Structures are given as structure tokens and as C-alpha cells.
Image (tube, rainbow, N blue to C red):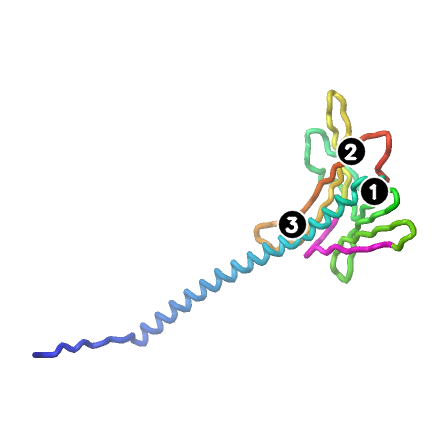
Amino acid sequence: MKRCESKKKGFTFVEAVVVTLIACGVMIVIQAIFSYTVRVTMKGQDNLDSIRAASQIFSGLRRDMLNFVTLSTGGARTVIPADEFAVPDTATYSQILTIKKHTERITWSLVDDGGKNYVERVLQSAGSPPQKKKFGVPRMKDFGVLYAISPNKINSLVKNMGQLIVKINIDSEDERFPSKEVKLSSVFFSDRLTDSDWNYLDF
């Protein structure tokens, strides 16, 4: 009987080089996809961190506006025409808001500390030194306040309804925002911001 011997054939040098190149190409593609995913995720996380920080400012403002006596936006005011909802492009925002209560004076303003922007809250009470607190928002560009009036018709009577608009602009490298900027805003309503016999606005 003749033995049948099978010959094992290995990769040639050229085949080994081709396989190696293909494997390297696949690894490069996988690495690129992974890096892009991580980069987008990190940018999205940065935006979320900024939004969380800005929400603390909005919450603090909402608490401070409870039972205020007078409110000042440093002269920043505008009129939103009837049947419109957007703030006019010509409106100018102020970077300081002053809230007066019966025994307190609270100021919110944009400050620069070492090249970084912060929103600073200063509480002044009679007989006590000012209490300062800074709110940091990652990559914050601007903080602005605006008093807006919009006519509201009720039973054929037109009454001006007032609202306080607070905006925070944030730099963003997220490709989902072509303007490279995230604009956050909050609107505060109060009966004391409407037409009344008592002036709650200090301009």
C-alpha cells in the first residue's frame, strides 16, 4: 500500500504582506470610527455640563424674583409686537440685573475673572457685609437680561404683559451646531411685570 502524504502549504511572503496590510487597514478604520464617536460624545457631554450649570443660574433667579419690590435691567427693554413671539433683532441686552426686596438688594452680573466669564450674585442686606457667589458655566460667552413688553388683548382691552428674558450663550465645537454656539434662555413671568398702578420697574 502506498501512503498518501498530504503536503501542508503555508502563506507565501507576498500573501502574508497582503494580509498584514488588510488587517492594518481594518484597524485604522476601526480606530477612526472609535475616535470620532468618543470626540462627538465628549462634545455632547460638555454641552450637557454647560446646560446643567446654566440651569442653576435660572433656578437661583427664579427664587430671587419671588416677592420682589422693584426690578432693573439697566435700561434694557423692548416691545414685542402683537401676534409676534420672537424678540426683535434690534433688542439690546444688559449684563446686569438688580432685584430689590424689602430688606435686600440682589445683583446678578457677568464678571471676568482671570480670563474666564462667571455670573456673580451679590446679596446685600441691611447691617451685613455683601455676600458674593460666582456661578461658572463652561465656555460661557455672554450673560444678558432684557425686559420685554408684549400687548395682550383681553375682552377688547389691550394690556401690556411684561416678562424678563435671561440668556446665556455658550461656545460649542459640536458639529451639530453650525453656529458653534449654544444659546440658552429662560423667561420669567410675574403679575408685577404687567401694567399696574404701582411701578415695579426701576429704569
Residue 71 percent coordinates (x, y): 83, 41
Residue at coordinates 86% horizontally, 46% vertically from top-left? 104
Q: Which mark is residue 117?
A: none
Q: Secondary structure at mark 2?
A: helix
16 shown above or below 183: below
Query: How busy is the neighbourhood of tag 3: few (under 14 within 10 Å), some, or many (20 plus)?
Result: some
Residue at coordinates 66% horizontally, 52% vertically from top-left? 52
9 shown above or below 105: below
Query: How busy is the neighbourhood of tag 1: few (under 14 within 10 Å), some, or many (20 plus)?
Result: many
Looking at the magenta stretch, what is its main secondary structure?
A: strand
Range shown magenta: 130-143
Q: Earlier in the sequence, mark 1 or mark 2?
A: 1
Residue 60 percent coordinates (x, y): 75, 48
Residue type pointed to by label 2 = Asp
From the image, tell me which residue sits under label 2.
Answer: 191
Evaluate if marks 1 and 2 touch, with contact meaning CB atoms under 8 Å apart. Answer: no
Q: Which mark is residue 182?
A: 3
Q: Which mark is residue 72?
A: 1
Residue type pointed to by label 1 = Ser
Quadrant occupied by the C terminus:
top right
Whether residue 201 sits left or right of residue 26 in the image: it is right
Residue 159 percent coordinates (x, y): 77, 27
